[in-house]
Amino acid sequence: MNTNKAVFLDRDGVITQDPPHYAHRIDQLMLIEGSGLAIKKLNDAQFKVIVITNQSGVAKGMYEEKEIIIFNREMVRQLKQTDAHIDAIYYCPHHPEAKVQKYRTDCNCRKPKPGMLLEGAKKYNIDFKSSFLVGDKWSDIEAGQVAGCKTVLVKTGHGFQEFKNIKKPVDYIATDLLDAVQNFIL
Ligand SMILES: [Mg+2]
Ligand SMILES: [Zn+2]
């Protein structure tokens, strides 16, 4: 059976602007410049583009799962305007100390755990060794490393602070997603 290669992307701070932290309303959605073009280039190079996002705001009672879905749908719509295509989006609404009991669990999907990558890999038959993870936090990088991807820390979002304190042997530090795609992944 043929395997696919993938780029797993964190959402907030990689594709969309962060702050605002815990963005969940459409009026808070702002794409980071160049992220659409970067994703389009990955599509053209036959990578599956899979978004994996921690959304503990749900566990904290700040917003509901349906708001994540509406926000994601709008992000996909805006990305389409530059011909960029997202193959799948996974989110984790849990937190071990959640205020909302339904979401209070030490799950396997919340990064730095690799659950969302494993789920995407199973569905799309992904070979981790030829795949990448791009994130703006060390918890993203750790999830990618546990799965066996090459990893990129971007300096957008939280990455601007994170890269000052290197916690993991990351493969590349990028200005933003477009830099990661053009100068490391492709
Ligand atoms: Mg992030
Ligand atoms: Zn989870």
Image: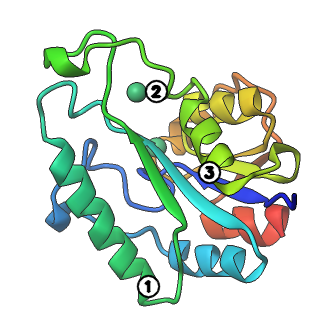
In this rendering, the answer to whether 15 lies above or below 145 is: below
Residue 92 shown left or right of residue 140 in the figure: left
Residue type marked 1? Lys
Q: Residues within 10 Å of mark 1 (few under 14, many from 20)?
A: some
How many angstroms separate mark 1 from mark 3 (CA)? 23 Å
- The residue depicted at 88 percent of the width and 45 percent of the height is 129
Residue 80 shown left or right of residue 154 in the figure: left
- Asked whether mark 2 lies closer than 8 Å to ligand 2, one says yes
Q: Residue 17, position in %: x, y?
A: 37, 58
Q: Residues within 10 Å of mark 3 (few under 14, many from 20)?
A: few
- Which quarter of the image is occupied by the N terminus? bottom right
Labels 1 and 2: the sequence-earlier one: 1
Q: Residue 168, position in %: x, y?
A: 74, 25
Q: Which residue is identified by label 1?
A: 80
Tag on residue 110? 2
Residue type marked 3? Lys
- The residue depicted at 52 percent of the width and 69 percent of the height is 86
- Which quarter of the image is occupied by the C terminus? bottom right
Residue 16 shown left or right of residue 128 in the figure: left
Q: Residue 72, position in %: x, y?
A: 32, 61
Q: Depth check: 169 or 146 in front? A: 146
Labels 1 and 3: the sequence-earlier one: 1
Secondary structure state at the residue bearing disc 3 = helix
User: Ligand 2 sits in which quadrant?
Assistant: top left
Foreground label between 2 and 3: 3
Would you say residue 30 is visible in this rendering?
no
Marks 1,2: beta carbons within 8 A: no
